[in-house]
Amino acid sequence: MRSSAEAIHEETVEPHPHGTPGEVFSAFLKLGLTSFGGPIAHLGYFRDELVVRRKWIDEAGYADLVALCQFLPGPASSQVGFALGLLRGGPLGALAAWTAFTLPSAILLVIFAMAATAFDGPIGAGLLHGLKVVAVAIVAQAVWGMAKSLTPDRERAGIALVAVLIVVFAAGAAGQIAAISLGALAGLALCRNGPVTGTTHLSFRVSRIVGTGCLAAFFLLLVGLPIVAAAVGSQGLALFDSFYRSGSLVFGGGHVVLPLLQAEVVSSGWVTNDAFLAGYGAAQAVPGPLFTFAAYLGAVMGPAPNGILGAAICLAAIFVPGFLLLLGALPFWNGFRKQPMAQASMRGANAAVVGILGAALYNPVWTSAIVGAHDFALALTGFLLLVVWKAPPWMVVLGMGLGAVGLAAI
């Protein structure tokens, strides 16, 4: 039996979308072509275009939606876009929002992957090395910014330090999972004093049955994919499993996917470390979500499937878990997010993420890119341009790439 409050709530929710999938696609294609600067910048672009100008949602509702997507694992800006497409155009609108926001950068990175083999000689080698140095500056900026916001006290700084030790002594995906899990448990004990956020109500057309089904599908795939992939011996399934698992564990922003993917594709020998870092640097120069780095990795993968098919598999696999979790959380979020224990756990998990990314800044990013004083000076210049002068990332990528070419020619 439904309560009278539930019945009234269902009657107040409009049964039809407010717009069309075509309208959603057009709005997000514009954003996908122009949204440089990473997840935080993307959320600002979304607010300007869809809250202020188009008025698809009010300020309070948008803030609530951002809080939900930052709470969940996955690419926060893409999850916000997916939810806004769902709100405006229903399920087809959600698909249209993701497609339009994601494809421009994915296509550019696949083109870069296909052309990367043409880069030979001192100029090409200098350019690719410059992209690896860019990755040092970008990841250092991410660690700096996340540490200030996610480890503001001694308790969370301590959790981050323990996470560094865990991933240093237990390399690979297992160490990262252990660090995040222990961080969440430590948060329950040490991070209870923070403010409980979120007071408004979100209304999406996702029933509890659909939400429960999406959560069940998320965990079934997380547990079942590695078993099926090992039993069948399919490289395509193994690829999907690796990127699905990486997308399932990303807390705190797109840059956190770097150590997860490095553990999956470089340690296994599917992608060389040089190609990995060059692609990560190139991903900073394109608009849209950083998760489209997966398309580049799928394209340059050593074993088949690779190329366009590999790019499609990796791109879909890394986004699916975040969207399943979002759809699963929407019907239950209003009650759950107000629980102090849930928020304390997430504070600990986010602090652990800072430690994981800090460890990745040293290995593989620093150790593979900084081989001399010139590289250090170039990376430091890029870091200061990003942090102090607030230069656009694409401009820093271009400038450092040209700088590396100049150094290689000397």
Image (cartoon, grey):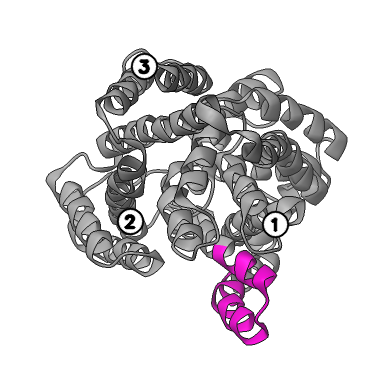
Q: Nearer the viewer, residue 348 or 30?
A: 30
Judge the density around disc 2: few (<14), some (14-19), many (≥20) Cα neighbours within 10 Å. Answer: many
Residue at point 58%, 44% (across, down): 293
Q: Nearer the viewer, residue 203 or 259?
A: 259
Residue 276 forms part of the magenta stretch: no
Residue at point 52%, 19% (across, down): 398
Image height of 381 relative to 368, above or below: above
- Which residue is disc 3 drawn over? 385
Amino acid type indicated by mark 3: Leu
Give the label, 2 or 1, closer to the camera: 1
- Which residue is disc 2 drawn over? 349
Amino acid type indicated by mark 1: Asn
Query: What segment carries the magenta color?
Result: 218-242
Amino acid type indicated by mark 2: Ala
- Which residue is disc 1 drawn over? 306
Callout 1: SS: loop
Measure how far apart labels 3 and 1 are at the Cα level: 36 Å
The answer to whether residue 84 is seen in the rendering is: no
Residue at point 71%, 62% (across, down): 305
* Residue 276 drawn at (x, y percent): 50, 47
* Residue 316 drawn at (x, y percent): 68, 55
| Left or right of residue 365: residue 261 | right
Residue 226 forms part of the magenta stretch: yes
Mark 3 or mark 2: which comes first in sequence? 2
- In contact (CB < 8 Å): disc 2 and disc 1: no
Measure how far apart labels 3 and 2 are at the Cα level: 30 Å
Q: Which mark is residue 162?
A: none
| Left or right of residue 23: residue 188 | left
Callout 3: SS: helix
* Residue 28 drawn at (x, y percent): 73, 31
Measure how far apart labels 2 and 1 are at the Cα level: 34 Å
